[in-house]
Amino acid sequence: MESFQFLLNGFATAATPINLLLAVVGVIIGTAVGVLPGIGPAMTVALLLPITYNLEPTGAIIMLASIFYGGMYGGSTTSILLNTPGESSSVVTAIEGNLMAKGGRASQALATAAMGSWVAGTIGTLLLAFFAPIVTRFAISLGAPEYFAVMLLAFVAVTAVLGSSRLRGFISLALGLAIGLVGLDSVSGQARLTFGIPQLGDGIDIVVVAVGIFALGEALWVAAHLRRRAVEVIPVGRPWMGKSDFKRSWKPWLRGTALGFPFGAIPAGGAEIPTFLSYITEKRLTKHPDDFGNGAIEGVAGPEAANNASAAGTMVPMLSLGLPTNATAAVMLAALVSYGIQPGPLLLQREGDLVWGLIASLFIGNTLLLILNLPLAPLWAKLLRIPRPYLYAGILFFASMGAYAVNGSSFDLILLLVFGLIGFGMRRFGLPVLPLIVAVILGPRVELQGRRALQLSSGDVKGLFGSVDVATGEFQLSALAIVVYVIIVLILFWPLLFKAIRKVLPAKAAAVVDEISEEPALAVAEHHHVEIVQTDEGPSRTEDKESPK
Amino acid sequence: MFLALAGIVILVDALQLSNNRTGVDPLGPKPVPVFVGSLLIVLAVALAVAVTRGSQGEAEAGEDIDLSQPVDMKTVLLLLGVFVANIVLIDFLGWVISGGLLFYGSAIVLGSRHFIRDLVISAVLSLGTFYGFAIGLGVALPAGILQGIL
């Protein structure tokens, strides 16, 4: 129960008037920006970073956490009230949510989303408080070889499990690694890939990369395809729900939470798979099967809870290992680095106050979100009508302000433009952006740990698989490192294995395909699911549909 | 077809990267860049092969995106122009003027036709952010030629 004590201290940190104020402001701004169409949680955090530059780290990270939760909630509001889903994590919420809104039940949809987010966020944060110290204790015991292996696993998992195409994922990863190489080598101090430009010597600021890829790249991409027709926004009153809605919602909330948290906590979990699973589960268990396809409240409550719980789960590897497993966590880690905080296993020990303050402020922010957003929802709905030219001009405006302010130098604006163009190109050619940003953050650390492991073994390759016991002077294989390597190999060769399994079990697999394709309401989600598992290695689309493992 | 182009672009890119890397570094810091460079080349070739075999990248969808339209390069290029102007002008003119121009130019390029309203919004935004961020929060934004006036 030591967590509990720490958590109380965390509340003491977070509950000072100034930090509470930061949390309130963060939640409001985060929601306002997150509601804006085309801006997902990752971009919300990236765009609002400048606000936090000159705050002291604890205040800054509290505000960031509030912005993050606000942005998440804003995103789901958008997907319920607009016809088209925005970020991948709210695709599933949008299916039934939008149908409910069209059927005149927008208020109830928003209410169940808000309450579900709150329930899932609160439970998820409790779990985070419980698991973070445990994982940290485990992480501290990791030596260079094990840590190297775990980070490699994060790379492979983020790249190969998520996204539509493994090949494109790895291209994105390699680009990110290349960006991470720029600057002085941390061991030898030699300049790499700086092309003689002195400003590149310190490496490229991760914030600039993140803002460029997420904000500028997205704005340019939208500009190239800007919808010229006005979008239909569904008007909404104050969210509320009756007893029957509540009765139908609370179980999906809890089930969604149970699905979401573990998926967020493992590398490569993300929110897509748990929200989809939650949708399927609710559809199976519902007592109102006719409502699915016409706006079933369970179909909003479950996935939305899963979405938020997975966001809380994401915090576990982020805070205890320094591993970002989704885009938003990647941007938040970038922010931590820009405050001069080194993420990694030692974070919880070195910056205990800060981390517990952050966890406590997640509780506070989450509750504020519920209190503020129920009455403010009609206002948020109005934000959806903002003229698009202003919206995207505003993104360019704030992106360049944020990038300039990192170092107060116009050189960063040039870099921002370069990354904006890279982000544009990646969107055009279907390269996922997440592996790139994860590689930029983790690449240098992977290299460092790998070289450290090799230094310890004087250059012997087996240094990557274990270490020399200090006491006995004998070489010991690390069981953990080897297990992790085996998992990596399994993930890499999954498509081949999958084919083999399929040959053995053709009948069963075919049955699954039939079952999925019988459900027309799933069209959007199914399409999305295909993206998740589709590979370049050969299996055709039909085959891909059947791996909801 | 576009994708084949992308494959070639990445291939050329990768070749250049690896050349730069291998030339500069001695043994210690060298292996990783060499690995990344070769990885890029291998992947670019793989992508080129995949593309010729008909694999297609899926362009990203979004709330305000209408993928049925062709890529509107004119808008993108004009936006880039506005952005470059901001880079060139920001240190001399300062954030208030260059940022305001950035917003004004972008809004018009993106199809806004309320020239006067746009101008007012740009001015309010850039002044507001300058006072709020640079003076209020101490974020580094340049005053430029308006130094002393603001």
Image: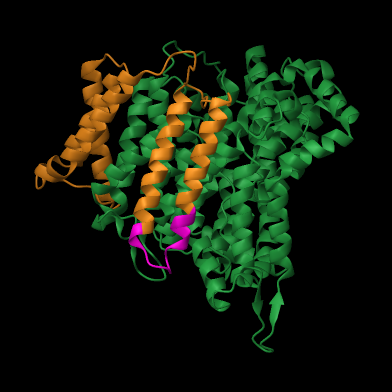
**Residue at point 67%, 51% (across, down):** A265
Front-most of A461 and A145?
Answer: A461
Q: How is the image coloured?
A: by chain
**Residue at point 38%, 57% (across, down):** B22
Give the vertical position of A527 relative to A68 (above or below): above
Q: Is residue A455 left or right of residue B123?
A: right
Q: Is residue B76 left or right of residue B117?
A: right
Q: Is residue A438 left or right of residue A475?
A: left
- Chain A pictured colour: green
Please say whether residue A11 is visible from this viewpoint.
no
- Residue A261 lies, in percent from the top left, at 70, 47
- Residue A96 lies, in percent from the top left, at 69, 21
**Residue at point 30%, 40% (across, down):** A400
Q: How many marks?
A: 0
**Residue at point 37%, 27% (across, down):** A392
**Residue at the far top in the pictured view:** A229
The quarter in which the N terminus of chain A is drawn is: bottom right
Magenta-colored stretch includes residue B62 = no
Q: Is residue A318 left or right of residue A64?
A: right
- Specify the segment rendered in magenta: B23-35
Give the vertical position of A425 relative to B144 (above or below): above
The quarter in which the C terminus of chain A is drawn is: top right
Give the vertical position of B28 relative to B42 (above or below): below
- Residue A487 lies, in percent from the top left, at 72, 54
Please say whether residue B42 is visible from this viewpoint.
yes
- Residue A310 lies, in percent from the top left, at 66, 44
Front-most of A187 and A415?
Answer: A187
Magenta-colored stretch includes residue B25 = yes
Front-most of A441 and A81?
Answer: A441
- Chain B pictured colour: orange
